[in-house]
Image: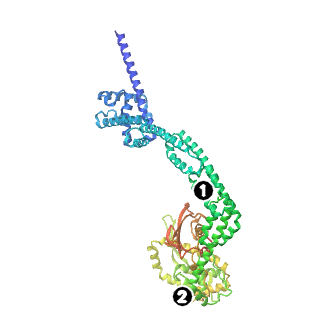
Amino acid sequence: MPTKRVLCFFIFTFSAITVIAQNCNDLVGWMNLIKQEYPEATSLRYMNRAKVQKLATNYFSKAYFEPYRGKTYAQLSQKTLVKDFRKIQVCFAKGNHRNDPHYNWVFQNVIYNNYLAYGNPNFVNQIATVDAKRDQLEKELATISKNSVSKSELLQLKQRLTSEYALLLDSELKQASSEIDIAIAVKADTQLDEILTSVERLDTDKSSLVELSQLKEKGKQLLPQASRGKQTDFQSRLDAKATAVLKNAVDSDLSSVSQNLSIEIINQKVVNFKKDYSSFSRNSEVKKGEKTLIAIKENLVEAQMKSIESSIAQVDNDTFLSLKNKYASHLPAQSPQYQKLTRLLNSRKRELAEEQRLAQQQKKLDANKGRIAFLEDNGIDEGTMEFKTLGLNNAAFFDYIYRGHFENIELDVNSSHFLMILSGYLNTFGSLCPEQLPEDKVEIMTQECSRENVTTNGYGVEVDRYCIAWRTVGTGIFADPKLYAAKMRLVAKQDQNALRTVIDMYTNPNAMGNSVDQIHKAKALLNDWSNFFSFNPCDSKSIEQFGKNLLAFANQQEPIRLKGMSNYEKIKILGGPGGDQNYTKLLNDILQNQSKTWAMNKYVSNSISNVREIKSQDQTQTLSLNANYNFNGLLGKKTGAVTVKFKDGLPDCIYFSDFPENCKKPNGALVAKYVMGQYGI
């Protein structure tokens, strides 16, 4: 009796273990659905609630739950579901599935949250809806291979998948889409076969090209839907027919082409040929035919090159484009004839631009005849005097002073900038030209600190020092007494307005920009004075003339005028050049020159990019140029923005993005180069 009980217990235990083991294997198979849908575990981390719910309803739908459990979810009682869930927990723990990111995720988010949802009618209804949608899709897919279903109906079904059957799993929709594509391909293959039948019935003369092109276009629309094999077959057979038709048609067209045609006629034949065969431009027979026509034109151009050169040399602006199209059109860029024509045409284009520039400038000079006559009649002859300013930052100002043409000077005599100019001249002349000073010369004086206030901390370490008393001392440099007196009068006047200047400096929203601008102007003047007396010798008559007029301007007196117009006034009158300009080169040269005055940053040569030209409303004049540039600063290589504004067609003000309100004048020599057309393309 005890033996029988032990045997019964053993049989029961073994059966229970076997059932649990079987259930565990089924559980793994059930959970594997998540790996099918989302192979990458990382894609599970940020899944939204709607996608999780979609997975859950599919997990518990008939198609996936019944193979695992043997019954649908709705057929299981509450008691059975509770027992099942306990077994699942045991299997999950025994199988150590927590360490698998897919199994752990599906257990926590799908099984744990939904297995005991028998009391939630919404969840049960959602499962029923998914089952119904799946049954409906299976019925639709069962009919797609029937002849009664058209291709357009198949395409509509494919479009409806993502909307009408969105509750089903993505893998199911993908599989359904593939089945529909196969059915569409069958119908597309049939349609392509019908097109091929029509293609192969065509004659091989040129009249078949229109119909062949139409059939090719129909096939092109069907090809993406057809099977790969049919795509290759269709293209091969279509190309073979096209080549036969095109060879016959091209040969027929070229047979009537003579080597002695005029260039106008051969141009028209090329145009007509391209138009007639546009649908088959990639075909080898068409390419060969076009190449033959172009070779004929190359020979014609080569034979007529001397007369063509003569025509180009005489062409004007009105007929330039038509002449260019006549001779250069259709020729390949690498052909010798095209390259020679391009050189001749570009040269003539530059000549025309120069002629236009000179004509425009002469027109402007004619409009200023009165001013030119006044300058020729008023003043003394310049004689042998020669005053050089080319390349100086303040070249125009220096030349206007020298010539006594104060009416052209925009600089205020009471400005700090003029005081810097006057002081710089006195110090430089006194240092470099002491022998030219008068006997009553005076020493240039300066202020130095005579007593300082020093502040220290508790350890005796200096933390601050500033001057509390000043004294006047000589510099050892001497100056003309009249010019020095004029300077001291301007200094005194500025000292009277010192408080107002300080208030303006601190209340001006662009105070920092103005301060930096003063530094740039001071550095530009240092560069000017270092070259000024190299250009103009100390004992020259021109320096004497300059000094006298500088004194007259400082004292606001009448100057000693020279006859003739200053080159810088003439530049303003002439305005900008005609034709296209290389604005990138112009901006590079302007910034290269202007950056010599920068205190910290260094401009990167040839770094101008993104040039934008702003023109007047009538498109006749350049108003401004905007561009980017690179510079090296304390924090390494940086990119800045610059705007050059134009006035009367000439570069007038340079504005940088860090101080967009500060106008910096471009170098006069560069403006002159621009006027003379040296930046023309």
The answer to whether the residues at label 2 and label 1 have Cβ atoms under 8 Å apart is no
In this rendered view, identify the residue nearer to me: 63 or 655.
Answer: 63
Residue 494 in percent (x, y) is at 50, 82
Helix, strand or loop under label 1: helix
In this rendered view, identify the residue nearer to me: 106 or 320.
Answer: 320
Q: Is residue 215 above or below residue 673?
A: above
**Is residue 397 visible in this depiction of the protein?**
no
Q: Is residue 616 above or below residue 443?
A: above
**Foreground label between 2 and 1:** 1
Q: Is residue 145 above or below residue 478?
A: above
Q: Is residue 622 above or below residue 141?
A: below
Earlier-in-chain disc, 2 versus 1: 1
Residue 544 in percent (x, y) is at 64, 86
Q: Looking at the rendered structure, which numbered label has been put on residue 273?
A: 1
Lateral position of residue 37 relative to residue 306, left or right: left
In this rendered view, identify the residue nearer to me: 183 or 583.
Answer: 183
Q: Quadrant of residue 338?
A: bottom right
Residue 625 in percent (x, y) is at 53, 69
In this rendered view, identify the residue nearer to me: 76 or 319.
Answer: 319
Lateral position of residue 176 relative to residue 391, left or right: left
Residue 540 in percent (x, y) is at 68, 85
Residue at the spot 29% in from the left edge and 29% down from the top edge = 78
Kind of residue at badge 2: Gln
- For the N terminus, give its image quadrant: top left
Kind of residue at badge 1: Phe
Q: From the image, tell me which residue sits under label 2.
A: 556
